[in-house]
Image: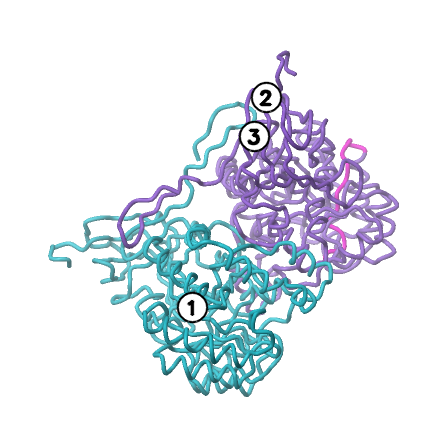
Chain colours: A purple, B cyan
Amino acid sequence: MSGEEMPDLVVHNIGQLATASPDGEWNLQLSKDGYVIIDGEMIVEVGEGEPPAARDALDAGGRAVVPAFSDPHTHAVFGAWRAQEFDLRLRGADYKNILAGGGGILETVAATRAKSADELASSLHEHLDVMLSCGVLTCEVKSGYGLDREHELKMLEVVSRVDSEHPVELIPTFMGAHAVPPEWGDDADGFIREMVLPLMDEVAGRGLVEYADVFCEPGVFTADQSRTVLRAAREAGLQGRIHADEMEPSGGTQLAADMNCASADHLLAAPEEELRGLRDAGVTAVLLPGTAFMLQKPYAQARWMIDAGLTVALGTDFNPGSCPIIDIKLIMALGATQMSMTPAETLVAVTRNAARSLGRTDRGVIAPGFRGDLLVLEAPDYLHLVYRPGAPLVRQVIQGGRPIYERGVDVTYAYRTTGEEGER
Amino acid sequence: MSGEEMPDLVVHNIGQLATASPDGEWNLQLSKDGYVIIDGEMIVEVGEGEPPAARDALDAGGRAVVPAFSDPHTHAVFGAWRAQEFDLRLRGADYKNILAGGGGILETVAATRAKSADELASSLHEHLDVMLSCGVLTCEVKSGYGLDREHELKMLEVVSRVDSEHPVELIPTFMGAHAVPPEWGDDADGFIREMVLPLMDEVAGRGLVEYADVFCEPGVFTADQSRTVLRAAREAGLQGRIHADEMEPSGGTQLAADMNCASADHLLAAPEEELRGLRDAGVTAVLLPGTAFMLQKPYAQARWMIDAGLTVALGTDFNPGSCPIIDIKLIMALGATQMSMTPAETLVAVTRNAARSLGRTDRGVIAPGFRGDLLVLEAPDYLHLVYRPGAPLVRQVIQGGRPIYERGVDVTYAYRTTGEEGER
């Protein structure tokens, strides 16, 4: 107890405490009139009724408390938005034609190369502020908009620097194999051999990344090329992640199982037999329904996957092209209303399961021995997270036992009729 | 110019000014490097380049400026959320069975009857705070969860009182014919004749409402019963609105045209020939895609309606049962990504068209002679409103020339590594 008699913090008067269990179950543990005791950064006790004393107390006011969220798949460092392209696509423009004209991901690569590290860090800070206000405390971030040594390193150094500056913990993934940049023409093999693999050794050696990812999709990288990348990752000491079968099946899901990846992501077009392989290999299926929503594609078969025994996590895929949705709560709502997940399953998917797919087994659960990373909701029940899409439901964020964020209680406005100034 | 030489306010350095035109066109008027001059509550000049001087200046910082939004369809006064029912429905429970067990709308009626006026006013204030933060300055609110004289009056008096307290302007609609309450059994005709019609005369006479609405749907009120309500509304000096063909076609759309309603709302199952009748009668189609999203129903045929020449507005349908979505920006995103509206059309639908369906022809357009109700977006382009669903894009709200809201710039958090306190 930090060398003192009393623990550091008690969060009490919790109307509903809702958490995934420490084991692999999908059912939530729900309790009423609860409390959580945190000492140092870790939870030491969870109970109901009268709480023991602690040095500090936080009154949840009868509200719901849930574990803080992890976002297991983002491309949150990028040089510019692509709103015009979104408008063109809604008007029927084809992505392949956009790409052929230097748009699409190539536009983001050009913009990201053009921006300084300071500019990229500043915009990453802004994104993380929004993520934090949505309850995220752990966030995977991929490189992959630099696509040459200089700019991939710039992206990863930005992630490392912002990780040390911002409360959201960043998990960096090397994704040199995100696309073949224009200067390599269609020489994907040469790009992998001469750029991706040497740079992967370098960034792994410098400790700049924890994972490596590859975009396995017809027209991007084949399953064979992806296997080359993931093998080299393993040799460099990195665990793999993979963009698999997002648009068309091409063996990516099978490859994730073969290579024992930490996660296989997207899976909109993944064949059922390959999904069973994921389950047997213990690979987490990271589903990204925001992308299907934004692109008007059929959603991944989340219901089938859960019923078949797969471990499923949900992420935003936050990026300036296919999915600019930054709010993980909105992703939970898509999971429930559009993919037939139960609200309880969506909570497990963005807490325990998302954290574990990132190797963070110390969070995503409210139980003794886990980190004191909690959210006090502006709601009496965790169900509101999916029942009220888009509502500002995160009232307070507690990180490692420290209250670090409180929702804009200090917005001011003037009342229309009386002219009196109001403090909200 | 308020008796002085200079106008009251100039909003300048507008990177993109995006507005519906004053006429009925769907195309936006877009300008760069713009300014808006407001004197008193009204816009007196809109231009590009160097702005004239004014007593106060607001620098938009190169951001986009759009008209403030109107939400033309809400049930924002209610006694309790229904999150548990939402969970049950996601697990496959049938709404008719829920209703038969006293749940569904009957649960909201019981909860609303049980709450005091102060309690209802307090929760309405909270909802309006969120709506304001989403850019809404004009909001229709229906009665219809009281369903007897005492509690319908209570609801409408709450709306009147909160309208005088909160900056969001409320447009009250009498919806005594929302459902038949339990004490009337299945005597819908008796309920209309003995409760709805006399109370409508009373609330119209007291000036408590501007519109009357009726739920025309198989199992609720027939087209004949709805006609009786709308005729009586007209005799009481109220214009009609109607919940028409939400689940199944039953003549509601045709009735809206026959009765020259201000709006026909929902229209998920409206036949095309009846929609043409709406167009010819000049009735606004108020579409509520949040409800289709939450209930997993097919969306209304927005693309067809716009191409056929109908006037289309978008609203939230904010209510505790079928659609708890409060963010009109999220509704715009649904319009664009799920109903094939262009982003420009969704902006027109929630500004000029929504305001006009509420009889507010003085707003929803940024042009001389319109109210100075503007939003400064945290984005360079109005497209972001639909391109980034769920993002907090409303930076400032200006109402009648007065800046009344600024987004939580003062949220504080502590940095994880350094322990330094940050001001954001």
Q: Residue at x 77, y 46 (%)?
A: A26
The residue under label 3 is A161
Is residue B402 shown left or right of residue B143? left
Q: Are marks 3 and 1 in contact (CB under 8 Å)?
A: no
Marks 2 and 3 on same chain:
yes
Give the residues drawn in magenta, as a range: A235-246
Marks 3 and 1 on same chain:
no
- Label 2: state its secondary structure: loop
Identity, as a three-letter code, of the amino acid under mark 1: Val
Q: Which mark is residue B214?
A: none
> Can residue A269 be seen in the rendering of this structure?
yes
- Label 3: state its secondary structure: helix
From mark 1 to mark 2, how far is it between C-alphas? 55 Å
Identity, as a three-letter code, of the amino acid under mark 2: Ala
Q: Observer-nearest residue: B422 or B267?
A: B267
Residue B59 image point, x, y percent: 31, 47
The residue under label 2 is A54
The residue under label 1 is B348
Q: Quadrant of residue B51?
A: bottom left
